[in-house]
Amino acid sequence: MCGINGFYNFSRQQIHDPKNLIKRMNHSVSHRGPDDSGEWSDEQEQVFFGHQRLSIIDLSQTGHQPMISQQGNVVTFNGEIYNYRELRKQVSDYQFKSQSDTEVLLALYEKSGYSCLQQLDGMFAFALWDCKRKELFLARDRAGEKPLYYSVDNGIFAFSSELKSLLQLPWIKADLDEKAFYHFLTFNQLAPPFTMFKGISKMPPATMMTVDASGIRFFKPYWEVEYFDYRQVSKQELAEKTYTLLKQSVHSQMISDVPVGAFLSGGVDSSAVVALMSQKSSGNIKTYSIGFENQPDYDELKFAASVSKQFNTEHFERIVTASEITEFVPRMAEIFDEPLADSTCIPIYFIAQKAREEGTIVVLTGDGSDEIFAGYRNYNRYLKHYRHYHRYIRLPQSVKKLIACAAGFLKETSPATEMFHRAALNQEFFWGAARSFKESQKKKFLSEKFQKRSALWSSYEIIEGYKQQFENLQKAEKDDLDWMCYLGFKMNDTNRYLFRADRLGMAASVETRAPFLNYKLVNHALSIPSDLKIHNEEPKYILKRSLEKILSTGILYRKKMGFSVPLREWAGGYMTDYVEKHLASFCTNTGLFDQTGLRKLVNTIRSGDKNVTNDLFTIYFLMSWFKKWMNV
């Protein structure tokens, strides 16, 4: 886990003191790699690389980056290649100087070129300068665990692990991308290529690109979900394969030259990871759990402690207080230069800090399982509505509009209302990651001028893009639950959970790994027939069945509690006061919000409606984010 930076001045523009710019970029992401810092440049070709290192594999100076091969190719690499030892055997004729996975990547590239990506099992983002081709080669891992941002401006291509690093470059301005802002209001997160900054893009997962003297030359995906035909495979066989793939993934991701631990909630996913880690480890694994002072409704500590006892882990609990929450909330905008309005970020920050304090540098998590194995109970609710949706979508347009109009009397946020309105617009029903404001709700608090500028926009374009990818996949039979799980993996896992884990782990200089999102396990999980993903209304049926050999019934089948934080109880008053205090100036300075509409939303929050806590957090986060990054 590291921070990578660089730029390629392919049009040979005049840049003042480019080496100092790389140092500044490195400094802005020093938290991503406190162990070592490096720069490299080819001034003749105008290529400049920077690197901040968190040492995980090969802790010696031979692992220093940017790393240069004997042929003169150079790489700055962030992440881990879990199968690097096996891959190293395939390039045994290469004269290795280190024991690092980074050098294995260099060797593989020199042997196989771009196709080296197909051999990598890991999480990564990297930039590699090919000195013979005079070409920059960049790629991001399949699930999108490691971030990669880039900009092309006036003949200069720049890249980094975080946006704040790119903003160190004098030719890149912090100008708002209004369309990205519009979509953020819908999803509370951003899908590639959007960032909140005009002219800066986020590279999609499983994508590679090349840049030469003409600019970006190739930009294409190198992997997509592969569905298998499991219609004739028994429940037991599916369960056995699930267990085998998860076990292989967990064991492979324990590879490290520094201590490895796990976040443990006591739920199915984190408990499974800990159970499988205990099979591989010769000593006691360190596990970490979070609790909230005097808030039993948010507390899973007893479940985590039970799992810890069963697998004899060295267990640590972090109890967060109300004052710590209110002190941390203002810091979130600083950490998330790409905005993410998700209050569950708060406990992750504290538990990552605790892991670092106890000497654990790498932690495995249970992230991603619910999306690919259909772990949410509200999926059942959507599936029941889908039966009606498919009938409504086939009705004449005039009838659909009439029904949608009548649905206006229903609760605006109900699934039934969503169904009627989206069917009337001939849109897909399930927008799984749309956690904030619907299109109709936005109109109530966005300024009239901004509404005119955004009149032709719809956040459905994000969902439609994923839907087209899904439709293009080869599968014997694809149904609604297949779509829901695919969207969950492609959008929510990547842009929320993995992004969240990366930023908060890195804020504490801790590397997080997600065994459930190994690409082989993803292919397998998404291929499980829908009636076995959810069976007799039991979510994650095959996964739970596969884990019965290592986890108790009490863990596997207890009611899912969900990962949440007492935000309303502890920070609701603080956030509401902040929003009210800055509301007028925020609306005036941004020109994006209507004061009257936004004040109505605040008044609803003041009335004690618990259902609008997320809306409050979104508005609060945006205000603090604009203040930090847009000087508003």
Image (cartoon, rainbow, N blue to C red):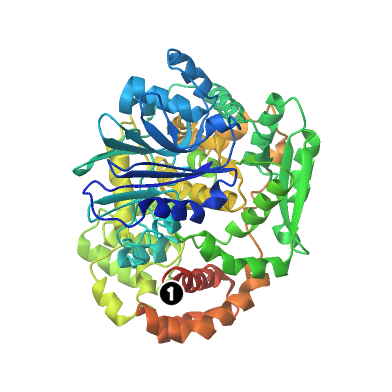
201 vs 242: above or below: below
Determine which residue is flagged by label 1.
Answer: 631
Q: Residues within 10 Å of mark 1 (few under 14, many from 20)?
A: few
State the image quarter where residue 397 is shown.
bottom left
State the image coordinates of residue 390 (x, y, percent, origin top left): 32, 50
**Label 1 secondary element:** loop
Dividing the image into 4 quarters, which one contains the C terminus? bottom left
State the image quarter where residue 132 is shown.
top left
362 vs 289: above or below: above
Q: Amino acid at mark 1?
A: Asn
Q: Return the residue nearer the eye: 342 or 350.
A: 350
Would you say 572 lies left or right of 338 here? right
Dividing the image into 4 quarters, which one contains the N terminus? top right
State the image coordinates of residue 318 (x, y, percent, origin top left): 75, 54
The residue shown at (48%, 79%) is 601
Q: Return the residue nearer the eye: 489 or 184.
A: 184
Q: Return the residue nearer the eye: 246 or 259.
A: 259
Q: Return the residue nearer the eye: 535 or 196.
A: 196
Would you say 269 lies left or right of 19 here? right
In the image, farthest residue toward the top: 93
State the image coordinates of residue 564 (x, y, percent, origin top left): 62, 58
Whether residue 377 is visible here, answered yes or no, is no
State the image coordinates of residue 199 (x, y, percent, origin top left): 29, 59
In the image, farthest residue toward the left: 214
The residue shown at (33%, 67%) is 175
Whether residue 179 is visible here, answered yes or no, is yes
